[in-house]
Amino acid sequence: MSDCENAAKIIEALKAAEQEPAQTALPILNALVRLSQGGREQSLEVEEARANAFMAICEIGKALHRGTSADDLWAPAIAAAERWLSLVN
């Protein structure tokens, strides 16, 4: 799958997972980790955007795993993935 497809799939999954309880959202987020890993060498700007999306997904996962609120983490994660998509699109 291309970076463009991966980023688009991540955005879609984040928006869907945001509406779910933690026990449902966590497996969705775990599947996104694979999609957010770099497959081929990209420009520094693209790699930074991809890494930011990855880290934002991890922050949501940590919050959900700990049972703390992730409400303020979803929008930045979606924005990070959208930024990545805009660079590879």
Image (cartoon, rainbow, N blue to C red):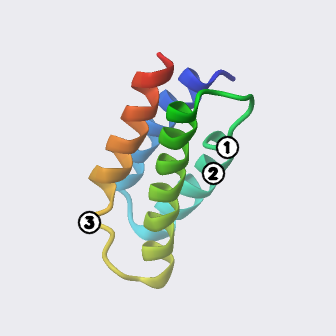
Horizontal and vertical percent position of residue 27? 59, 59
Q: Residue at x 48, y 47 (%)?
A: 53
Residue that sits furthest to the front in the current view: 44
* Between discs 3 and 2, the one toward the N terminus: 2
Q: Which residue is tagged 2?
A: 33
**Amino acid at circle 1:** Gln
Q: Quadrant of residue 85?
A: top left
Task: Pick the quarter of the image with the N terminus.
Answer: top right
Q: Nearer the viewer, residue 88 or 29?
A: 88
| Real-space Cα separation, disc 3 to disc 2, in angstroms | 20 Å
Eye-nearest disc, 1 or 2: 1
Q: Nearer the viewer, residue 5 or 46?
A: 46
Residue that sits furthest to the top in the current view: 89
- The mark total stands at 3
Q: Which residue is tagged 1?
A: 37
Q: Which residue is tagged 3?
A: 71
Residue 52 visible, this orientation: yes
Considering the numbered disc 3 on the image, is that residue within a helix, a strand or a loop? loop
Q: Answer above or below: position of 56 versus 36.
A: below
Contact, mark 1 vs mark 2 (Cβ under 8 Å): yes
Horizontal and vertical percent position of residue 16? 39, 45
Eye-nearest disc, 3 or 1: 1
Residue 19 visible, this orientation: no
Q: Answer above or below: position of 71 versus 86.
A: below
Contact, mark 3 vs mark 2 (Cβ under 8 Å): no
| Real-space Cα separation, disc 3 to disc 1, in angstroms | 24 Å
Q: Is residue 76 left or right of residue 89?
A: left
Considering the numbered disc 1 on the image, is that residue within a helix, a strand or a loop? loop
Q: Residue at x 32, y 42 (%)?
A: 79
**Amino acid at circle 3:** Asp
